């Protein structure tokens, strides 16, 4: 998606210039992993015009491979973001009806080629919300990942104003979740989407693992919104036994809150792939997310070294010469 | 519509900022007439969100009344413009599928209220191309204008990539044209849309007047494109008797070519309403169009005094202190 | 007035670009009320040149009617604003000598026409400070409002460096205050301008109501300036019986402090016109003022919904999708 | 003066940013001479606030000494410039009433100190138009220059909308012209200001030299305005014997036309001080003026080498590595 | 290299912002070929810091593979460009001493891997001018290309202010030229670098082919510099038999002249690889170069379709919707 | 040096524009002293090209004399600054190898002329780190200052990645320190550079005074880095008897941290030259440094009045009209 936002904290009606950033929840995870030095691919469908090509160029610039991007008809999904400050909230106007991506279908991608040799596959609940084709294509991908032994993570985010194509998430999401190794979601979501309940995060996690036996990890973040410019953030990871909790990160000022959940997910995936220590993995994820708040745009451009510094407790922000 | 364009002559892929201008062929005519000191209303339907409100604000700023703007669901129509230079052409990517305006219908506007006391009604061929509802609403407006004795002008521009709703312009345009006093179009268009032919502009005009007896004037412009930065422009007006031709305007450099046809139409309407001399009217229109090429954005912000200076033959551009 | 300010927190000598915002204490109140959905008119006199026209365009864009704006000779009032941060204060260089507005006089405005059917009339102490004509014109307006039963509010702000035309505020202000329903001012001002004293806000308010029997409400705000980037703000409203106090709003970061008093006034007027509860009115005013600190420019562009959210105690600034 | 202009060729009402350039006819000459490597002083009076200080900083940056700038009350003179293109003229809104400079008087400057050791003194007809004090101060300067044997040049430009303080240029200008060595003006001006007539430039020049015996040179430029983006320019210099004419410079595109007359004057003064050849001097002046049209702002930043290249006939603009 | 230039046509001393473009003669050719749809690699050495990484990101964005970019010590080569207009020339300040690229050596690149399967290898005379290591590395590449049967083109541009490392181009260039299939250069260069003379381009070309038997094509462009804003350009290609000449392209206005030679080279290489017609190839090259003049930055972003339109004689720049 | 930084808090790879600020540790002190109203000279060597001239123009603008700037070969020293926020650190990429300044030598400056009549001479440890010539030239300056009785201050900052010319700071710094009246440094530095130890700042200071008998004052600042946006700062001054400590300044938000040490030094020098009270001097220095954090660029543009306000304990940042 292309994000268009007024400069600084101007309101929509005040501006005659819009700043461009490309993003999208899965793309954000891909860019972040690429910044951490992993080889990342974004699998999608873009419109076959100069702006669709520009979107791909943006990903390549940030080291994501666009080898598996397909081009065709449909619009470039857009969203307009007005950035708030203090007690004024940021606002988003979505404009992604009939995007080229929503016209994807099960045949668009040859998942066997894409996933051969991959070490991770990540998806989010935005994709199956857009169209039956998108849901079908995603399911095919997850199933191929399972067949090839590629771990799968799902951020089961649910946006009720999407899901316009006649199916409910309760119909679609369970089959997708079945193939997951790692799920990002809250107690509330587990209940709403799968009717899986538990009185605590740990209990709900345990119930999810029972219902979806492939799941090895359940994770979630917790955000305390003091103002649009000041948040506190932490994360937790349940491995079926224990809940590993990160430090609470005090974040102010907030430069850009968009994509901070994706930054967490990328950090956690990197952590799981790199460290043999779940506590370190969740801390890396939370620190990555905290750092994303300081970076303009949807994608996290923090390096491993920067995340490690913060994850180790140094938030001093001292000038590096 | 909201136009989004890279600064200067940057290509789409080079930019990370887009400049905003609101426009649209009928809105452009309204703004230009308002700048000439006439009271102008824009009758349309905008999305009911901050950007739809910003579009209305833009019109009001330039002295167009938004009293008859309706707000509702649907997108804000967009287009992306890359401005060329020299031998490199400008390019437009349209993105106006499913706009709030395309969801207008015959009941959205109470034309009797709108047109009471009006001295002119202008429409273009973009509107009926968008949806059946838009065509219906327009037809109702033209018929009410006819009933109230309000002169009607139609710019019968034909864009083949619009007209996606299952009807052809050949089916729709004749009924709309029937109520017109003034038609802007070329020989080619008369033939294509109405099967009205003539070997010269004059003959074709005469044939149009025979077919559509309300028509009193046929007009057209002629553009010689030497490069994206250098054009020559003239206009002609046929009144059933005689073809009144404007001077040929040599235009360089070209700052912004978009909306120059609308600027001509507004100039001509102003001329017809103001001067009792057709030659003066067409010259005013052509000079207005020439000046628009020097003004960034879709709308012509030239004043009557500026147009008069140029129409009188003074193109020296001497500094006014 | 046109405000010209260096970008961000640059000092005057550092910049070669100035950002434009139009404003002025009464205009600010008008824009804010228009954003709240009320029909607002700004009654003033602007220079008859392109910048004067641009000032009017700015107001119309933000839904204020410029029907009663008069155009004539004189300058456009300007002020130059350098925005501070942290412990560095913002600085204003005023440049409004001999403005078109200061050349207004009692005959410029036909108040009977303007105020017919109005539900509120607002003025501030800046106007009578500029010229005898401005004071005369204002007095005529207040008297007409009184005759037509239109409630009048006065922000009796006193700037000693204005008042250059030979009269003192002590001579001029009492007659203007006589017609007021609502007065914004402090104990100190009551004493300085009217020699009305009281040891507390409540007592001073009571004394004002005795001296000016039309006054039903006395109001004031209290600001604790921790730094140029961090303030605390509250408001109180005395109705002759009771002092209604708002919550204390913690404001950081501060984007733009200019016009926050006017935002309070607009919020309070809206509250008095809308709610039948003085506590709610003063809370709405204070929350409106707090939100204005987050908005660039002189005018408050917060919506009723945004103010209500904050007034109800939710300052979390959570992203609205 | 501070010039404020919309970016690119935007109209005043379109912009929300203004670009700053400091300038003023005499300051422009000073900066240009400083760029040519001469030691130049600007003698003026600026307001004693941050913008007045910024004006002085601007001059120092471009190597003009501000040792003789005095600071005091009054405004900073402003003008608003809208830049035209093609057949649309540029427009200026002056805003310099009651400037700090207009409050200068005969005692503000100790001309003996200022002019000691100077090799040239330049003034223009703007200064005596502003106030009696400015005229008095200037006259004192010219008389001191005469006493110290410093050559004096006067650009006798006449702007009728200035001269508001009760005196006419016919009363004031002759005394100032009496001390001049070099006068820039046209036949028309000689007649209007001094009632000195001649049927050709040469004859009028001869008549001027008779009336004002100190004058050794009369000079003028000729501009053919094809459009706001395309001019042709030449200059001529009469030495009492012969008229030396420069080449005709074809100038397109025009980046900035303001200050091109001052650039000519500076080039001519430099030429007279440097070359022992009047033809070379007038050619240098005309080439300097032509180059100024390519430079944004009021002042000419061309170097001697660049002017020499153009004056020698090389207008190829070939890249210098 | 990173190019830094003031906005628009500002002089260096006027600006406080610099626009960034990455480029470099070989990189420019690579980007242009990638835009034409060919797979292009840039083989170089960048500094191992954030700006070196940004340089690589820039190339990837424009579809050039950075697989063979090596990172290490040394600076990022810079140049500062001031863009001229009309009769004012553009100026470059080079700042590339001790660049990371100049520290390349014969072992840095494994040419066998790089060139395996390649269809073209292009180099320029800038590379061997920088250091012995760069010359050595290039020679190794050319020899490997010869061994693998990959055609080699050399732009033998000679900049005398480079070549600081103790060798002359006369010592170094012949060995490099020996492996070439296509050489871009002028009669003058042939004589200066190789002591190969001929009274016409054709004769000199023939002599070059005699001296260097691998050469099949000699090419050159001809530029008529009317001003910095207006050039005329043509190209010619000698195949040992015949000189194929392109049309003369009239180019105005010029947006950016940098990299237009590289654009020609890329166009010619594309033409030679794609068309079986030398006339078409040279025309494509010349049209590509002409179009580059309209594109900001060092690299040509014209598409094949755009070049074809211009090469076929349509320079009208008509808006594409 | 020229500093180039992405706008706002963008990362290097995100930007295509760089903001320019000139600076350098000694130049920063000079500008700050000039803003305080003292006459300041910067003695240096700049490259003899347009950017070197622009550097000098920058200094003159801010009232520093460039009379003793010499021009010659070599580069303009650069550094690239990415500004962090919150827990993300700012980063600097230095690029000053082979600067024109590093090519200075003992003969470049005629110190006797420069220092005649001076009231202070300031140097820093950056200068002798760059080249033998720079160290020699500095030593000559210090010795001349001593001879003429001019007090000398040295900021003995040590950057290990400089010092590439074959000498160690331990070899070079003692001779430079010998001539100092005031030294800015920490216990750790005294030990590392001079092998002078002490268990507290006071004891180490006393030991320094014993080793270098000309030293009358030892000073240092203390920074508590809570985040890149929030620091706490204080300073202390030891006069051989007593340690004078400033208030602790709470600084948030931080606009620009660069040059805050130089701002302290300039404030302290101003304090020592102006006040007869060491406590006041150190407080003025610390307040100056605190204010610098609010000012974009390397140099402190705070005025004496602003520093006095803060030094007196008023950090309210209240708007000044």
Image (cartoon, coloured by chain):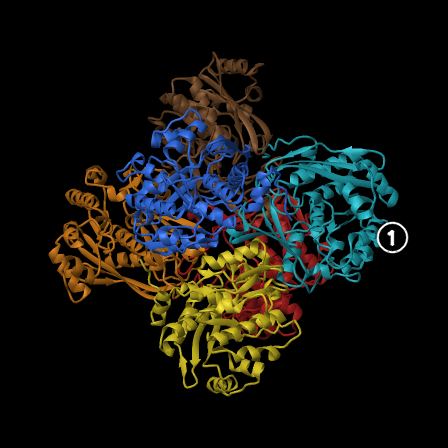
Chain colours: A blue, B orange, C brown, D red, E yellow, F cyan
Give residue B116's position: percent from left, percent from top. Answer: 21, 39
| Residue C234 in picture, x, y percent from top left | 52, 23
In terms of secondary structure, where does tag 1 sit? helix
For this orientation, the residue located farthest to the top is C241
- The quarter of the image holding the C terminus of chain D is bottom right
Q: How many marks?
A: 1
**Is residue F244 or residue E49 the one in the foreground?**
E49
Residue occupied by mark 1: F147
Identify whether B10 is placed above or below C118: below
Q: Quadrant of residue B6?
A: bottom left
**Can the viewer see residue D251 in this picture?**
no
**Residue C189 percent across, percent down from the top left:** 56, 22
* Identity of the residue drawn at 50% across and 85% down: E204
**F133 sits left or right of D230 in the view:** right
Q: Closer to the camera, F188 or D320?
A: F188
B24 lies above or below C30: below
| Residue F99 appears in the rendering | yes
Q: Which chain is disc 1 placed on?
A: F
């Amino acid at each position: 998606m292309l994000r268009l936002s007024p400069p600084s904290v101007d309101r929509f009606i005040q501006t005659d210039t819009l700043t461009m950033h490309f993003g999208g929840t899965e793309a954000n995870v891909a860019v972040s992993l690429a910044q951490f030095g992993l080889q990342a691919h974004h699998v999608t469908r873009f419109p076959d015009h100069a702006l669709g090509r520009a979107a791909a160029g943006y990903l390549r610039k940030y080291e994501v491979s666009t080898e598996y991007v397909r081009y065709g008809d449909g619009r470039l999904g857009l969203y307009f973001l007005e950035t708030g400050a203090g007690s004024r909230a940021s606002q988003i106007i979505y404009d992604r009806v009939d995007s080229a991506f929503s016209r994807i279908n099960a045949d668009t991608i040859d998942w066997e080629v894409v996933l051969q040799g991959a070490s991770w596959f990540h998806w989010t609940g935005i994709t199956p919300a857009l169209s039956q084709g998108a849901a079908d294509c995603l399911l095919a991908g997850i199933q191929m990942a399972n067949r090839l032994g590629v771990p799968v993570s799902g951020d089961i985010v649910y946006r009720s104003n999407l899901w316009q194509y006649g199916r409910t998430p309760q119909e679609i999401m369970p089959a997708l979740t079945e193939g997951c190794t790692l799920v990002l979601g809250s107690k509330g979501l587990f209940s709403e989407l799968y009717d899986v309940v538990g009185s605590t995060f740990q209990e709900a996690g345990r119930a999810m693992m029972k219902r979806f036996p492939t799941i090895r990890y359940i994770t979630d973040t917790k955000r305390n919104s003091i103002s649009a410019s000041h948040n506190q953030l932490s994360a937790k990871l349940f491995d079926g036994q224990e809940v590993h909790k990160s430090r609470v990160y005090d974040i102010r000022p907030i430069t850009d809150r968009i994509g901070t959940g994706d930054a967490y997910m990328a950090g956690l995936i990197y952590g799981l792939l790199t460290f043999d220590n779940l506590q370190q993995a969740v801390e890396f994820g939370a620190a990555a997310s905290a750092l994303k708040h300081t970076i303009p745009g949807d994608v996290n451009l923090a390096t491993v070294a920067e995340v490690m510094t913060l994850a180790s407790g140094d938030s001093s922000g001292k000038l590096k010469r």
